[in-house]
Amino acid sequence: MPNSKSLASAPRIPANFFAWQGWRLDLPPRWNPVKLEGDHDKGFALFADLVRPRLGIRWNKQRRGRLKLDAWIGRVLRDEVGRLAAEEAKPLPMPDDIWQGSTLYTEPQPPGRDVWIGYSRKSDRLVQLIYHAHRRERLLADTILPTLVDLPQDQPMPWSVFELSCIIPPGFRLHTHRLNAGDLSLTFLQRRRGAPRQVSVRQVAVAELALKRMPIEKWLDDQQRGSRKFYSRARKTTPLELALGERELAGISRLLKRRWRFFFMFRLPSRFITWALHDEARDRLVFVEGSDEQLVRDVAASVGHAAGVSADADRALDNEGADSE
């Protein structure tokens, strides 16, 4: 398993980027996900600003018995924009070593939808980007599509949604997610023979207000409350510190062990360790818990990896969003 250094040293990306189910995409800062459905093989994501929907992403994995690629792309495009509009679509140059069948339909008289479809060699997935255009522009083709990346599953996988970002070791799949205002969490599982490995990341904002409401020890109790039916405390709370470049996180940790009366539940991890950290630089409370301490350490070292964006880059993305309105 990669260590914390390898996870934390993965490529840094601007704060206004989205990484989900193997897709990575840079977006204008005012665009936020309002719908996230499906898994790595098939799913949908919808982004909107305060006024209207802006971008949809739909993906589907290649299955045996499917149509040939050209026929598949043609059918999907006809389903999306209609037969007559699909005939007006044109090939769009994209890296041939990654994308096949890259096709773009541009709405001639907005408002309408610009639609791009491509097939990724990396994951055998067909992906559609549906941009809701309200005036004639090339935001989809010139600004958004060049940032689209299909990330390999055999390497550490970055995830970023709203202000929660982390890097998860290969082999883990997203199990559950909760994206409430100020309280974001992602849970990942690695299924294998015996007990699966599990890691969860939770971020609470704003930390200053959260710690006024109750101390970090109480927050740790609250985080572990759902596990108390199957687990008991194995040791007292211990302090910890984590240095991440210029950021230093301080907090506490606690180990839970599976209760003896549940020894027959071999698919339940035998232990859980939870870290509760105060990220003062980002004013966030961060909770990372998993089935082994090294896994928790690796993932905790990557939380917030997408936060270090320069003011110039931030303004550039903001200008792009303003131009698209």
Image: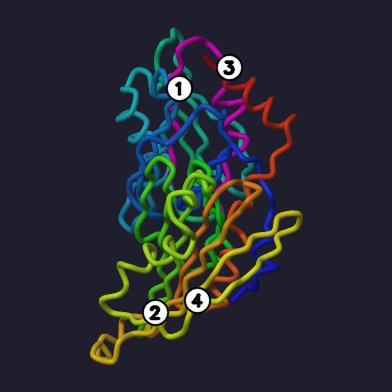
Discs 1/3, front: 3
Of residues 71 and 324, the one nearer the viewer is 324
Discs 2/4, front: 4
**Lower sequence index among marks 4 and 3:** 4
Which portion, as a residue range, is magenta? 126-151
* Residue at mark 2 to residue at mark 4: CA–CA distance: 30 Å
Q: Which mark is residue 200?
A: none
- In this figure, which residue is indicated by the disc labeled 1? 114
- In the rendered structure, which amino acid carries the disc numbered 3? Ala
**Outermost top residue:** 109
Residue at 61% in and 38% down: 147
| In contact (CB < 8 Å): disc 1 and disc 3 | no
Discs 1/4, front: 4
**Lower sequence index among marks 1 and 3:** 1
Q: With 69 as the anchor, is 248 left or right in this view? A: right
Q: Which mark is residue 237?
A: 4
* Residue at mark 1 to residue at mark 2: CA–CA distance: 42 Å
Q: Could you classify mark 2 by the number of other residues whose Cα lies within 10 Å: few (under 14), some (14-19), or many (20 or more)?
A: few
- In this figure, which residue is indicated by the disc labeled 2? 192
Residue 153 point in image, percent of width and height:
52, 62
- In the rendered structure, which amino acid carries the disc numbered 4? Thr
